[in-house]
Amino acid sequence: MLISLQDVGKSFGDTIVLQGINATVEKGERIGIVGENGAGKTTLLKILCGEYQLDEGEYQIGRGVTLGYLEQNSKLDANLDVYGEMRRAFAPVLEAMAQMQVLEKKLELAPHNQELLEKHAELAAIIDAADGYNMDIHIKKVLSGMAFGPETYEKSVSVLSGGENTRLRLAKLLLQRPDVLILDEPTNHLDFETMEWLESYLNAYSGAVLVVSHDRYFLDAVCTRIWEVEANSLTSYKGNYSAYLPQKEAAIALQQKQYEADMAKVEKLEDYIARNLVRASTTKMAQSRRKQLEKMEITEKPRSGPQPLNFRIEFDVSPYKELLIAKNLSVNIGERVLLKPFSFEVLRGERLVIAGPNGAGKSTLMQVLDGKRKPSGGMVRLGTGAKPSIFEQQQLRRAGRVIDAIWDKWPRFTELEVRSHLARFGFRGEDVFKNCASLSGGELARLRFSEIVLERPNLLFLDEPTNHLDIYTRESLTQALMAYEGTLLIITHDRYLMNSLECPILYLENGEATRYESYEKMMRRSEAAAPVVKEEKAASPKMAYGKEQRKRKAELRARLKAVEDEIEQIGATIVELENEIALPEVLRDHVLLREKCDALDDNRFRQQELFDEWEKLLEEQEQYEQES
């Protein structure tokens, strides 16, 4: 057991956040923590990390167990570059290496000094425990997985985007390899490739993982247990998110059935007591029933759970068929090309997802389409009758109260109408008088959608609308967008939403825009070319096996031999480098050690490239053999 919570409680003033929490974390577990925004998930994480003191109960952590915590808004050192920030994860190792250099100079003068030898062994143990001599290999591996190529190593942390900042913080934490990895919404701002890499990494992680996430695909791919934080308590369910849902429904149904049975029994006892207590012949029996009723433990009525938002987005005026037209549209920022000349149109009632890696220019393209930014070339226009509404990725802070945000724009509404409308978006009771400046990201998003519904648009531009929403509100928004009969252009990394919309996807990467007809085809885009080639070859008549084919076959044999020879040479070089890295004189010279590690990494990368080429050449050779 790594962590144990027994009857844990935490309050802030008179507000109870957590009460009676009992849970354990075992080695190798992957625990997903779900619940409404404000339910206490982050408070629970801060208790686990020791940042919050308990008001009641007991929290135990195993001896020697290390914790690593990724907060939602933690900061990096703005004075460092990307690689320098990653090296900070090895701060104890770097300090031990620096001390070892000084110590080794002393040992040259006194090689038999027992105190110096013991200190040297302690420092070596620190370095070996963290695999410090392979530090640069580990750094490059994790940076590569988090989409930081060699060209970003010297990039200043101060100029990183929000998504890059999240990825670098996560990469740094993964390098520390704690026994328990605690992550608070790690998938925010991650693109598809990075999310898939992270899922694979966490599945292979040797320690335990606790993660707060509102991404149901991520929870399904990673988690072996779900903790639901609701009504100040915690309930544990086996399996991933998809397994948790039917378990919860079954538990609620069973509790409701038991509650109804208990209430029926109570009603029966009360009726018997009322009819028989005043009769002398049955008084004793009625009193016995009363005692039975007083001792009876009645099952608690099931909680209603998170209230889904119940809203629809409707419009009054139907626009012309061609609602958005882009011709030879190009988008640049400075000298960087985000979109090469590209033409497309979106018709009335269609949906289009804009996807792609972080930094590909999705938000910039959306600003061009919705009219906030001028295109670098070509043209874009909205069709006659278009009435758009825009949801921006970062909702601006605004003045005034929540109720005023609606009342100022629609002053003819009565207070009852405004409050009833806001209640559909989770603002109930005194929440409507909250200052907008104090709202969370999720609350700002809900407030903006409450305005969009009243705007009654027939064209929606949405930029990452689910980023700050909890998993239940995401579900409500997904249902509303699926039911929307207007035209929708949406940027999202939410794979569940994207798949649910069942619409084409415009994928941006390296200045190119590619249209895929479905989410599944986009996710399999790397395989898309192969079937087409095979079909074309199958459809064409078999070519005569002549001079050109024999020439190509000879070229293949020669290239295969050359690739095999180079693979063998690089294999020998890798073994030689690994032996050299283990030499004491190399270990003592940290500049030389880094050069050797870089060379080893480069050779391994080149070896993989050659293996990939060898497989392709072999496939082509086999194809020629079949034709001949």
Image: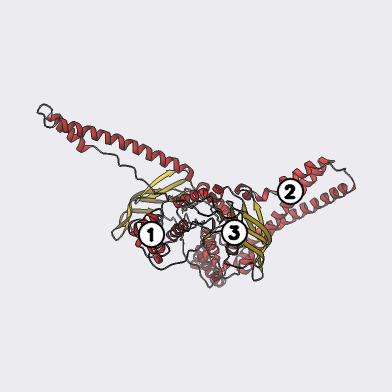
| Residue linked to disc 3 | 384
| Label 1, label 2: how far apart the Cα atoms are | 69 Å
| Residue linked to disc 1 | 413
- Asked whether 244 or 362 is in front, the reply is 362
Asked if the residues shown at circle 1 and circle 3 are in contact, with their CB atoms under 8 angstroms apart, the answer is: no
Q: Where is the C terminus found, in terms of image quarters?
A: top right
Reading the chain from its start, which is encountered first: label 1 or label 2?
Answer: 1
Residue 367, position as x, y percentages in the image: 58, 64
Reading the chain from its start, which is encountered first: label 2 or label 3?
Answer: 3
Q: Amino acid at mark 3?
A: Thr
SS for dot 3: loop
Between circles 2 and 3, the one closer to the viewer is: 3
SS for dot 1: loop
SS for dot 2: helix
Q: Amino acid at mark 2?
A: Glu
Q: Badge 1 local density, few (<14 within 10 Å), some, or many (20+)? A: few
| Residue linked to disc 2 | 615
| Label 2, label 3: how far apart the Cα atoms are | 55 Å
Q: Is residue 39 visible?
A: no
Q: Amino acid at mark 1?
A: Phe
Q: Badge 2 local density, few (<14 within 10 Å), some, or many (20+)? A: few
In the rendered view, tell whether residue 165 sits above or below residue 278: below
**What scheme was used to colour the molecule?**
secondary structure
Which residue sits furthest right? 547
